[in-house]
Image (spheres, helix red, strand yellow):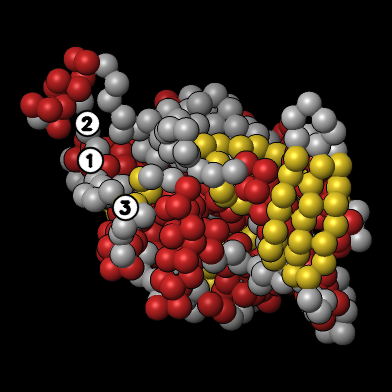
């Protein structure tokens, strides 16, 4: 079977980010964009500029700073959307405008409340307008898998005639079966003149758990681009998982007939970074990146693995960037050992960063006997938050048990010296939060809080993720410590730093004129 190159179009920052609970700040988006660049994705959909001013600015920033991949911006077939998307990708080395419109009768009648002819005309006009900004225009027929095949062919033909270079046929609601989805690509290729000269793209949602299978069926039928997200995040049940598609090509390339350019050793780091940024990690049994993906529990399996790793492992952890630990770090480990382990984990720290991480590592080693890779990853994410640390927690003391829990908190911030406050609550975390809110004089409502233990054992580090509404704005924060009250307080302080930073950005943008909203 011939092996084809398939482009990886990552939409974590757009389809992934728009799902509930995944919203990211502009700094977080840029950080993830840089990691997606290191991963080697071919196209990165950076956002939907018409959705908000924040989205617009974020696409502009990514387009200006991430130079290698194609940077795509999404737009409905509306003049204003296309104008915003076209302007947002202007700074890119290679920018793409991605226009979409629904093509199924269900969507045309009940969502758009219009006719097929109108949709066809809008699609033509949109591609033509997008071409004024770039030669790289992608057209998506939303709900393609439930679209009348005749009409689908007509609209694809029109988009190609107007100059679209990529045509995407999404399974928007995750309804298609692999056979049917593949057949749609075959039919478009056979019936639409010029379809073989553009890149056909697959975009699958996972409502029936078939997003990856459908994407593979599309590739077998001629698709040369797949749209996917890290950890499979996305609307409802999510999108096709990037790591599953990439590893399928890596492990079963000859059987599937395709390869892609992603550096598989960056997969785990990208997955973890996304987890830290959104506060939501893949389930333990998630293929390729789940905590148990490489764990062998049963005696028979362990025995087989000891004889030959290939007995029960088709992917070696190193292939996706999970290095096998060669040394255990602890209280007596020095800076060099720490630096070496970080390098093995793929982090090249500057002297300043190493000094900061080492300070935190030593504090942790006083509380915890063995420091494992998961602890090191948490330390590095903790130490280099994206928002400047205007607020810092300098002291925390809680008293709890069979009395009303009370907390005493001391903090530094954009004021001189330290401020101290005491608070009470239903539990020690609530008491600490009351004291922090008192110090800042801000309304804080905690919307969700989750805790995960990073490593086994009683001295494990607890990682807290929370979402809080600060003066009406929803923000997320993370914090880690062997003490879960401290981890929670740190997570809240992290969210407050983001709120402070966002307020300042907003204040500075009041004086500037942006294209968005004009
Ligand atoms: O699922 C979908 O149809 C989409 C389009 C906007 C490409 O996300
Ligand atoms: Zn989608």
Q: Residues within 10 Å of mark 3 (few under 14, many from 20)?
A: some
Secondary structure under tag 3 reads: strand
The part of the image, by quadrant, that contains residue 294 is top left
Marks 2/1: CA distance?
7 Å
Q: Are marks 2 and 1 in contact (CB under 8 Å)?
A: yes
Does the image show residue 404?
Answer: yes
Percent of width and height locating residue 465: 64, 45
Q: Quadrant of the C terminus?
A: bottom right
3 or 2: tag closer to the N-terminus: 2
Q: Are marks 3 and 1 in contact (CB under 8 Å)?
A: no
| Residue 313: mark in rendering | 2
Of the pair 224 and 323, the residue shown nearer to us: 323
- Residue at position x 47%, y 66% in the image: 359
Circle 3 residue: 329
- Residue at position x 83%, y 84% in the image: 512
Circle 1 residue: 316
Secondary structure under tag 1 reads: loop
């Amino acid at each position: 079977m011939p092996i084809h190159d398939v482009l990886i179009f990552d939409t974590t920052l757009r389809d992934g980010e728009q799902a509930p609970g995944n919203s990211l700040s502009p700094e977080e988006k840029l950080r993830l964009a840089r990691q997606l660049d290191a991963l080697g994705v071919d196209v990165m959909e950076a956002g939907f500029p018409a959705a908000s001013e924040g989205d617009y600015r974020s696409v502009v920033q990514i387009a200006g700073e991430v130079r290698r991949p194609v940077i795509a911006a999404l737009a409905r077939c509306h003049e204003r959307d296309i104008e915003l998307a076209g302007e947002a990708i202007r700074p890119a080395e290679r920018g793409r405008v991605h226009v979409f419109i629904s093509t199924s009768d269900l969507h045309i009648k009940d969502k758009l409340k219009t006719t097929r002819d109108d949709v066809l005309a809008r699609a033509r006009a949109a591609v033509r307008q997008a071409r004024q900004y770039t030669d790289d225009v992608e057209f998506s027929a939303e709900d393609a898998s439930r679209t009348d095949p005749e009409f689908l062919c007509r609209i694809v033909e029109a988009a190609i005639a107007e100059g679209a270079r990529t045509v995407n046929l999404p399974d928007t609601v995750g309804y298609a079966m692999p056979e049917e989805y593949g057949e749609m690509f075959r039919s478009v290729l056979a019936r639409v003149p010029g379809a073989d000269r553009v890149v056909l793209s697959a975009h699958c949602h996972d409502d029936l758990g078939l997003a990856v299978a459908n994407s593979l069926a599309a590739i077998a039928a001629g698709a040369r681009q797949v749209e996917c997200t890290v950890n499979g995040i996305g609307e409802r049940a999510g999108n096709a998982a990037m790591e599953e598609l990439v590893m399928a090509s890596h492990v079963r390339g000859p059987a599937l007939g395709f390869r892609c350019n992603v550096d598989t050793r960056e997969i785990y780091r990208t997955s973890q970074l996304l987890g830290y940024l959104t506060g939501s990690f893949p389930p333990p049994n998630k293929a390729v990146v789940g905590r148990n993906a490489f764990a062998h529990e049963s005696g028979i399996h362990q025995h087989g693995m000891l004889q030959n790793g290939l007995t029960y492992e088709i992917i070696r952890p190193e292939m996706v960037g999970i290095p096998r630990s060669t040394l255990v770090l602890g209280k007596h480990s020095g800076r060099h050992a720490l630096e070496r382990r970080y390098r093995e984990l793929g982090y090249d720290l500057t002297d300043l960063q190493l000094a900061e991480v080492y300070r935190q590592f030593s504090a942790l080693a006083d509380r915890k006997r063995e420091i494992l890779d998961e602890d090191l990853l948490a330390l590095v994410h903790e130490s280099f938050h994206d928002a400047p640390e205007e607020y810092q927690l300098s002291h925390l003391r809680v008293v709890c048990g069979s009395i009303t829990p009370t907390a005493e908190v001391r903090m530094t911030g954009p004021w001189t010296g330290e401020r101290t406050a005491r608070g009470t609550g239903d539990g020690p975390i609530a008491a600490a939060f009351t004291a922090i809110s008192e110090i800042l004089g801000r309304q804080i409502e905690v919307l969700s809080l989750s805790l995960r233990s990073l490593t086994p054992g009683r001295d494990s580090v607890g990682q807290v993720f929370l979402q809080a509404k600060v003066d009406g704005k929803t923000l997320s924060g993370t914090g880690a410590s062997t003490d879960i009250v401290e981890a929670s307080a740190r997570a809240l302080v992290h969210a407050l730093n983001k709120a402070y930073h966002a307020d300042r950005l907003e204040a500075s943008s009041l004086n500037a004129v942006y294209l968005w909203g004009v």
